[in-house]
Image (cartoon, rainbow, N blue to C red):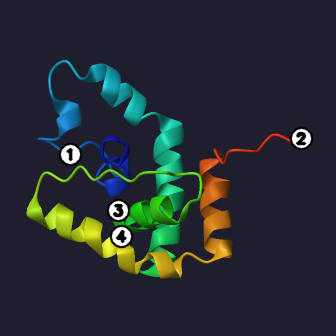
Amino acid sequence: MASGVLSGKYLDGFPENTRLGMEGLDWLKNRALANDRIEKARKIKKIADQLNVSMVKLSLAWCLKNPNVSTVILGASKTSQLTENFEALDVVALLTPDVMDAIDAVLENKPVLPEF
């Protein structure tokens, strides 16, 4: 979940007792919490809110629906996280072409196939 950014927990500051606060992970914290990544996460949150789903569910559903993603690997550390991850299956149906386009517009990382 992008080192926790797509969970939404870093959108309003830096909470205590997170993995990114661990000693020696400053490099990951700086990369994960770069301003442009947080801004994109805020935009993804707006899309998730419009669909009435969590950012986690939306993010995983996007991976499942995206033809450019071959494998979705879950990294839950709590049973509740695993349950929420599985509930992303219910969100896939909400991802219309318009919603997928909106997410792609935020991420700006959709691969472009070469022309032959």
Looking at the rendered image, the disc whose residue lies closer to the viewer, 3 or 1, is 3
Q: Which mark sits nearer the N-terminus, 4 or 2?
A: 4
Q: Residue furthest front?
A: 116
Left or right of 57? Residue 109 is: right
Q: Which mark sits nearer the N-terminus, 2 or 3?
A: 3
Kind of residue indicated by mark 4: Ser
Up-down: is 67 above or below 37? below
Q: Are marks 3 and 4 in contact (CB under 8 Å)?
A: yes
Kind of residue indicated by mark 1: Pro
Residue at 50% x, 81% y: name it: 93
Residue under label 3: 56
Residue under label 4: 54
Badge 2 element: loop
Image quadrant where residue 80 sits: bottom left
User: What label does residue 116 carry, if any?
Assistant: 2
Residue under label 1: 15
Q: Which mark sits nearer the N-terminus, 1 or 4?
A: 1
Q: Gap in Å between the C-alphas at discs 1 and 4?
A: 19 Å
Q: Are marks 2 and 1 in contact (CB under 8 Å)?
A: no
Q: Gap in Å between the C-alphas at discs 2 and 1?
A: 49 Å
Kind of residue indicated by mark 2: Phe
